């Protein structure tokens, strides 16, 4: 299981690691897809669960969208709805999304990641 490098997060919740079917966030293992913000982690229904992502509007500026083991593009209607709500979407594979989230979080920025498991 890959583990992220230690960084200062000023009380915010980082992604600590990941593996087949799970993510470790703030020291706790979560199975399945998740949304992670500085405040915490919640289960996510995947790309079909648009409402959970749109609820991030006004709370985050950037959403790193982890699409699983491979880089894939989310449905254009989803990214358009998020961008219209003021959330910039950066799709990538889930390991890259978790690392990008942690780096951006450590900079004190308003960021989230939505991660599909490997």
Image (spheres, rainbow, N blue to C red):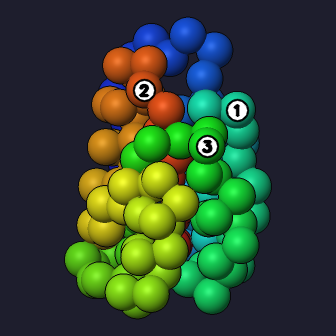
State the SS at label 1. loop
Task: Answer few, some or many: residues within 10 Å of disc 1's Cα (few below 14, many 20 plus, some between 14 and 19).
Answer: few
State the SS at label 3. loop
Where is residue 32? Give x, y as percent. 65, 72
User: Is residue 62 placed above or below 44 in the rendered structure?
Assistant: above
How far is mark 1 from mark 3, CA to CA?
14 Å
Image quarter (top left, top right, bottom left or bottom right) of the C terminus: bottom left
User: Is residue 74 placed above or below 94 in the rendered structure?
Assistant: below
Label placed on residue 39: 1
The residue that mark 2 highlights is 109
User: Is residue 49 placed above or below 109 in the rendered structure?
Assistant: below
Residue at horizontal 24%, vertical 77%?
Answer: 71
Task: Answer few, some or many: residues within 10 Å of disc 2's Cα (few below 14, many 20 plus, some between 14 and 19).
Answer: some
Image quarter (top left, top right, bottom left or bottom right) of the N terminus: bottom left
Where is residue 88? Give x, y as percent. 37, 55
Residue at horizontal 68%, vertical 80%?
Answer: 49
Q: Nearer the viewer, mark 1 or mark 3?
A: 3
How far is mark 1 from mark 2, CA to CA?
13 Å
Where is residue 62? Give x, y as percent. 41, 47
Q: Quadrant of residue 67?
A: bottom left
Q: Are marks 3 and 2 in contact (CB under 8 Å)?
A: no
Where is residue 96? Give x, y as percent. 28, 55
Q: Are marks 1 and 2 in contact (CB under 8 Å)?
A: no
- Residue 26 in sight in this render: no
The residue that mark 3 highlights is 58
Q: Nearer the viewer, mark 3 or mark 2?
A: 3
Q: Quadrant of residue 52?
A: bottom right
User: Is residue 74 placed above or below 100 in the rendered structure?
Assistant: below
Residue located farthest toward the front when viewing the structure as drawn? 84
State the SS at label 2. loop
- Left or right, 78 with respect to 36, comes to left
Q: Earlier in the sequence, mark 3 or mark 2?
A: 3
């Amino acid at each position: 299981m890959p583990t992220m490098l230690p960084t200062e997060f000023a009380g915010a919740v980082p992604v600590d690691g990941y593996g087949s079917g799970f993510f470790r966030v703030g020291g706790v293992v979560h199975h399945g897809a998740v949304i992670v913000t500085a405040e915490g982690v919640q289960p996510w229904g995947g790309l079909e669960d648009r409402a959970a992502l749109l609820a991030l509007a006004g709370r985050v500026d950037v959403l790193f969208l982890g699409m699983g083991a491979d880089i894939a593009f989310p449905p254009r209607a989803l990214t358009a709805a998020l961008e219209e709500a003021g959330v910039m979407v950066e799709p990538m594979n889930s390991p890259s999304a978790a690392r990008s989230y942690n780096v951006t979080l450590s900079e004190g920025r308003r960021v989230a990641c939505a991660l599909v498991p490997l």
